[in-house]
Image (spheres, rainbow, N blue to C red):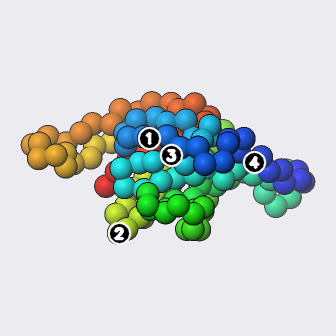
Amino acid sequence: MVEETTTSPNYAKGTTKEAQYLKPVVFDDVEFINFPDFKISYAGTRRASADGEDGPVYTWLDFGISGKDSDSSISATPQKISWTDGGIISPAIFQFEGKVYKLNLRLVEEGWIPDTNGGANNIHIPASPLESNELFIVPP
């Protein structure tokens, strides 16, 4: 059995940067990433084996989400995103203020989303790999 290990983020407290939906963003270099509707914070990574000595090793990346006007630390329960090493990685689905978002890690899944700016065409999201410290948010 592999002992659980935890890696804490190494960013300066209070640091922020702006980000857009549908664009990869590095998540481990600042405390808060401001998206148009919310801010997100990387809380760290945990690794542990599943039950049994031969079980797969799972990785959890923890994030917290709060309103952009919140000046305190993340108040919401952190979202846990988990997958097995070498496994298929699916986006984490989360809700904020009644809207459903997808948080992608390691891989952006191909898909389509409606054009919310009044356009007649849907927006195509091509499949693409992400670096290990990047995330990609798909808006509702």
Mark sitting on residue 8: 4
**Which amino acid type is shown beneath numbered disc 2?**
Gly
Secondary structure beneath dot 1 equals strand
**Residue named by callout 2:** 98
Above-or-below relation of 9 to 94: above
Callout 1–callout 4 Cβ contact below 8 Å: no
Residue found at x 41% / y 48%: 35
- Whether the residues at callouts 3 and 1 have beta carbons within 8 Å, the answer is yes
Identify the residue at image location x=11%, y=42%: 119
Instruction: Please determine whether, in this image, residue 31 is positioned above or below residue 133.
Output: below
Q: Secondary structure at mark 3?
A: strand
User: Which of the two discs, 1 and 4, sits closer to the camera?
Assistant: 1
Quadrant position of the N terminus in the picture? bottom right
What is the CA distance from the residue labelled 2 to the residue labelled 4?
A: 30 Å
Q: Identify the mark nearer the N-term, 1 or 4.
A: 4
Amino acid type shown at disc 1: Glu
Whole-Å distance between the Cαs marked 3 and 1? 6 Å
Q: Residue at x 60, y 48 (%)?
A: 14
The residue type indicated by label 3 comes to Ile
